[in-house]
Amino acid sequence: MKVVTEFAELMSRLEECRRKVDEALDKWMPREDEIPSVLHKAMRYSVFAGGKRLRPFLVLESCKVVGGDEEKALPAACAVEVLHTYTLVHDDLPSMDNDDFRRGKPTCHKVFGEGMAILCGDALQNLAFELLATKLPEQGVSAEVALKCIAALAQATGSRWLIGGQALDITEQAKGYSDRSPEKVSLIHERKTAALMQACCVIGGLIGDANEEQLNALKNFGYWLGLAFQITDDILDEIGDPEKLGKSVGKDKQQKKLTYTMVFGLEKSRQMADEAVKKAVEALSIFGNEAKMLRILAQFILERQS
């Protein structure tokens, strides 16, 4: 009963976060009737296609955990969401994963065409950094902290991490995933997934004026949470419900992609996800009850169906 109550509390908090972020994004994103309207329609279509707003939640909660004002962190929460959306738009392209559905809706390139989807992703990536550079100072965040946030997001999503992970995935796909070692799958997915979640926690901590110990704790939490999320995602792609996921399942297996379930099998992958969640929770040991929502979120990752 306690777990059910805690998950209900988490869902309420996630919904509150989603509402705040969506209201701010609606205000700060270009309107559909602004030239070039088709590009702005594609951007808004992709951003408002649904989703839990998990990454913005990490920004806001990490800020709160260290005693910061989450309102100051709202632009950063919006920034990580539009950047995450850009990665999804590009990931769905025919030249990448070639997916027709995302969150239960046709993907951007299916609605607006491949060329416009590429531009949509490019524009969303730029918008993320514009929000950090302009809206954070408007919310009372110092220029120094705003610059640190820009650097953290740029580094986490650049060639060494997120984009680098996608490049490694493409390279391995071209080689028929001949290297199916545990080291290779970890190398790819700590970049493709964990790096951005880690950055979300660090950015929230920076805005909340976290000290070095607190930042390191949030950084470690984000890393292990990201790995747990990716392992669970791989499991759901194999045994999940397409209706709940909002996308097709089994595609990774059909394409023989390098996933945790391919390398380790379902049972071992479940054990690894559980271990990653334990390490994520352990990383929060320096915090008290103020980290309650982050701890519940870590446990929720194991139970999620979408």
Image (tube, rainbow, N blue to C red):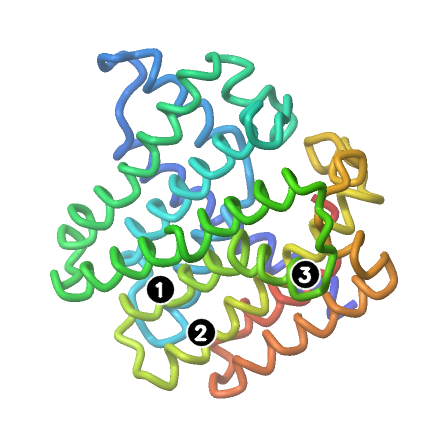
Circle 3: is it few (<14), some (14-19), or many (20+) Cα within 10 Å?
some
Q: Is residue 158 visible?
A: yes
**Residue under circle 1?**
204
Q: Position of residue 291 (x, y in %)?
A: 50, 75
At 71% from the left edge and 41% from the top edge, which residue is drawn?
176
Quadrant where the N terminus is found in the figure:
bottom right
Q: CA distance from mark 1 to mark 2?
A: 9 Å
The quarter of the displayed image where residue 217 is located: bottom left
Is 200 above or below relative to 47? below
Q: Is residue 56 left or right of residue 297?
A: left
Pointer 3 or 2: first along the chain: 2
29, above or below 37, in the image:
below
- Label 1 packing within 10 angstroms: few (<14), some (14-19), many (20+): many
Find residue 42 and report its image quarter.
top left
Q: Which residue is mark 2?
A: 218
Left or right for 12, reference 42 = right
x 75%, y 68%: residue: 272
Residue denoted by label 3:
300
Check the image and report above or below for 119 versus 267: above
